[in-house]
């Protein structure tokens, strides 16, 4: 799927040494793989709901301790789509 098509650019942006430094012995790849699977699932869900990937997408990442982290990145239209999806899920679950 597309959990991280532009991994190199995103990795470079997220590795700002002022935000955190890699810790020796931490398996960041394992956390990233978990996050990638979840990002792929979210991106598939967004696509199924008609949300354009250019408007909203999930991106795999890790936190400073190697834990899986998924970031949502998008423009205003994408955030509005997410709000619309959430409102419909809430309405159907009641």
Image (cartoon, helix red, strand yellow):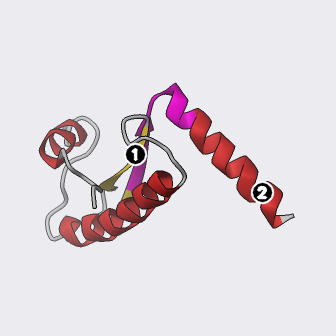
* The magenta stretch spans residue 1: no
Residue 40 position within the rendered picture, expressed as x and y whole percent measured from the top left: 35, 62
Q: How many marks?
A: 2
Image quadrant of residue 29?
Answer: bottom left
Relative to the observer, which residue lies in front, 38 or 24? 38
Residue at left offset 36%, top offset 35%:
54
Vertical relation: 70 (above or below) 84? below
Can you say whether 42 is above or below 52 in the image?
A: below
* Label 1–label 2 contact, CB within 8 A: no
Residue 31, percent across and down? Answer: 29, 68
**Disc 1 element:** strand
The structure residue drawn at horizontal position 15% and vertical position 39%, both measured from the top left corner, is 9
How packed is label 2: few (under 14 Cα within 10 Å), some, or many (20 or more)? few
Residue shown at the point (24%, 52%) measured from the top left: 4
Extent of the magenta region: 70-79
Numbered mark located on residue 90 in the image: 2
Left or right: residue 40 versus residue 22 is right
Residue 68 seen in render = no
The quadrant in which residue 41 appears is bottom left
Mark 1, other Cα within 10 Å: few <14 / some 14–19 / many ≥20: many
Q: Is residue 84 left or right of residue 81?
A: right
Q: Position of 83 compared to 94: left or right?
A: left
Query: Quick check: is 76 in the magenta stretch?
Result: yes
Q: Among all residues in the image, which is located at the extreme right?
A: 94
The residue identified by callout 1 is 57
């Amino acid at each position: 799927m597309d959990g991280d098509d532009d991994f190199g650019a995103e990795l470079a942006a997220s590795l700002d040494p002022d935000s955190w430094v890699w810790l020796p012995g931490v398996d960041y790849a394992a956390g990233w793989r978990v996050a990638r699977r979840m990002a792929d699932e979210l991106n598939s869900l967004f696509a199924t709901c008609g949300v354009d990937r250019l408007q909203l997408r999930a991106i795999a990442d890790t936190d400073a301790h190697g834990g899986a982290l998924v970031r949502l990145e998008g423009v205003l239209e994408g955030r509005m789509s997410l709000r619309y999806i959430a409102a419909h899920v809430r309405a159907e679950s009641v």
